[in-house]
Amino acid sequence: MQKILFTILFFIPTLIFAQSDKTFTYENKIYLPNIKTVLCYNSNKEQSLPVILLNSAETLTFGFDDLLAGTKNYWYTIEHCTADWQPSRISSIDYLESFNDDRILNYRYSSNTTRKYTHYELTLPNNQIQPKIGGNYLLKVYEDGDLKKPVISQRFYIVDSQVAVAAEVSNSMQVEDRNYKQKINFTINHSIPIANPYQDVKAVVMQNFNPNTAQINTKPSFIRPNQLVYNDLTTNDFWGENEFRKFDTRSLRYKADNVKDIFRDNESVNVMLFQDAPRNTSAFANQYDENGNYFIRNTDGRDDRTESEYTGVLFTLNAPAPSPNGEAYVLGRFNNYTLSKENKLLYDASRKQFYGNILLKQGLYDYEYVWFDKATNTIETKPFEGAFFQTENSYQIFVYYRKPGARWDTLVGYVNLSNKPSDRR
């Protein structure tokens, strides 16, 4: 057991610098192992959701680190997408009033760090890339001006605000689920003519900006003058889940929240977290979290972006495997809630423990453990985290409208709400 622990703890995930895939996928994805810590948010508030208003002063901040350091020739472009994140297949002339692509020229080298890297950053819209219609967009970053060398794909949203969305969070209407699930009811108030709401309007509801939870609404429960009501008894039910677990690596000089040990040598830094226990059988315990978010912070230096260290973070979960055919993962917004080899946990059946080491930049992190059941092809947090109606979650509602005869979906409404009234905005 000591040998296994030593191997995991002092193993920084190896970077295999292989050629990337040949094409982009329409999701948040990193295509090269040397690319880390992709950030994309509304510039008005750090780590807010990547949503901005069309024709406003709002901008998006996008950034990432290259662990190969040095300077690379990174280019980027954006593409308009449908409500379900497929290419709209319209000309760039239809959605851009500027150039099609540009090179990322804003970059800085790391300093005072054990692992060297280069931080790249850009702001959208800018003088070169200016969207002119609302909708879903995919930001594509690629090498040497060659779209066949993908580096990053990142989703973001531009709202052409034409409708208002009123929403509330309540208990599930299903009696057996009232203590475990949260239900979203919402109404779209509009003044635009909608000839066929069942065909022209789609509303996507998401929990904690986790794409794995997205539910698509195509049929309103009631149609009233200038209103579409979505409050069907069986739709938009979400497991309440639990408050996120968290850890704090803002400083590597002392052990902060949930950090058990810090190991440092000339080549790497490793952080061991306290062992986690399953919370599926315990009572709900309220604690403050960031609904899965994370923040890059470094109290030991001056610049969070370029002086923050990369550390191997050891996660340990003391729990039996929920089923014989499945896998456990550590998820959060820091990895876009994506099941990947990097955040997959190893299982020691003799000790009933899961282990994993993930390379992460210094900061504050929310995380949770999930179980991927291969038999049912489902992702669940309940086996490790439990589910409680009392859990504070944020919910995002995106409303899309396609005019009769139009060739693309326009994002015409958006709301971000919480089941805590004081947090709604």
Image: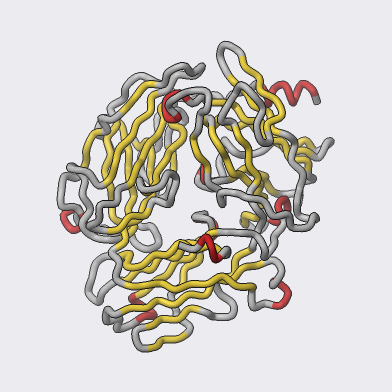
Going by the image, does 311 lie left or right of 287?
Answer: left
- Picture residue at 28% right of the left edge, 55% below the top: 80
Q: Is residue 299 above or below residue 89?
A: above
The image position of residue 245, as x and y in percent, is 65, 45
Point out the residue furthest to the front here.
Answer: 422
Q: Quadrant of residue 128?
A: top left
The image position of residue 301, as x and y in percent, is 48, 23
The image position of residue 383, as x and y in percent, is 73, 54
Point out the residue furthest to the right here.
Answer: 350
Going by the image, does 58 lie left or right of 114?
Answer: left
The reply to whether residue 24 is in sight is: yes
- Picture residue at 73% right of the left edge, 74% below the top: 176
The image position of residue 159, as x and y in percent, is 31, 61
Going by the image, does 316 lie left or right of 13?
Answer: right
Figure quadrant of the C terminus = bottom left
- Picture residue at 39% right of the left edge, 51% below the top: 50
Q: Nearer the viewer, residue 133 or 80?
A: 133
Q: Is residue 234 above or below residue 215?
A: below
